[in-house]
Amino acid sequence: MIELIKESKPVIEILSALLAPFLAVWALYFTRRQHKLDSQKFKLDLYDRRFKVFEEIKKFLSGIIRDGKTDHKQLLNMLHQTNEAIFLFDDEISNYIKELYEKGLDFVLIDKKVNGEAPIPDYEDRNVLIEKSSEYLKFYGNQFDISRDKFLKYLKFEKL
């Protein structure tokens, strides 16, 4: 029995020497695999958060087209629901949301003047205000395609 142990000692030493590199390679493989999974999860989470902002813009636009107008509550809700955009996109989307908000403020004021809720100054004509209101509706109606095009580069999976 002792002789068997003496004979197997070189084999055990060789196996022990091979075990360390094998474990190192296995650990490297496992670490790289985990990193790849973490990266994929990050991309999926980023997609979900970006898509939520896109959906809120579409909901905002739908409300304007459905009602034919907007109000301060709707504008503030859109800002609140898209407040993460500054962290999820580059300046293009943040500036786009700002543009929708600012045009919305103008649209609210014009709507109030047209409907008699705000005074119309002498230098403004009600018919001109109605035309401006119509232009804002057209602007917001066109934003469905424009917003899709703006968000597309951020929501394509191959670009995440």
Image (spheres, rainbow, N blue to C red):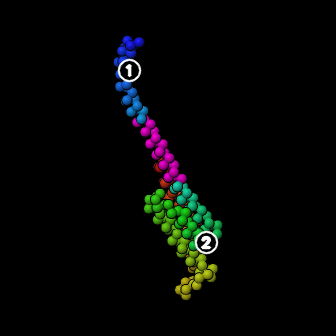
Kind of residue at badge 2: Lys
- Main secondary structure found in the magenta portion: helix
Kind of residue at badge 1: Ile
User: Which residue occupies the extreme front position in the image?
Assistant: 2
Inspect this view and state whether residue 51 appears: yes
Residue 52 picture quarter? bottom right
Residue 60 picture quarter? bottom right
Determine the secondary structure under disc 1. helix
Determine the secondary structure under disc 2. loop
Among numbered discs 2 and 1, the one appearing first in the sequence: 1
Give residue 111's position: percent from left, percent from top. Answer: 60, 77
Front position in the image: 123 or 43: 43
Front position in the image: 129 or 40: 40
Give residue 17's position: percent from left, percent from top. Answer: 35, 25
Q: Quadrant of the N terminus?
A: top left
Q: Residue at x 57, y 77 (%)?
A: 110
Q: Residue at x 57, y 75 (%)?
A: 108
Give residue 7's position: percent from left, percent from top. Answer: 37, 14
Give residue 69's position: percent from left, percent from top. Answer: 61, 71
Circle 1 residues within 10 Å: few <14, some 14–19, many ≥20:
few
Q: Which residue is under mark 2?
A: 69
Q: Which residue is under mark 1?
A: 12
Q: Residue at x 63, y 70 (%)?
A: 68
Find the distance from the CA under tag 2 to the CA under tag 1: 82 Å
User: Which residue occupies the extreme bottom position in the image?
Assistant: 122
Would you place residue 8 above or below residue 92 in this image?
Answer: above
Count of numbered marks: 2
What are the residue bounds of the magenta stretch? 28-48
Circle 2 residues within 10 Å: few <14, some 14–19, many ≥20:
many
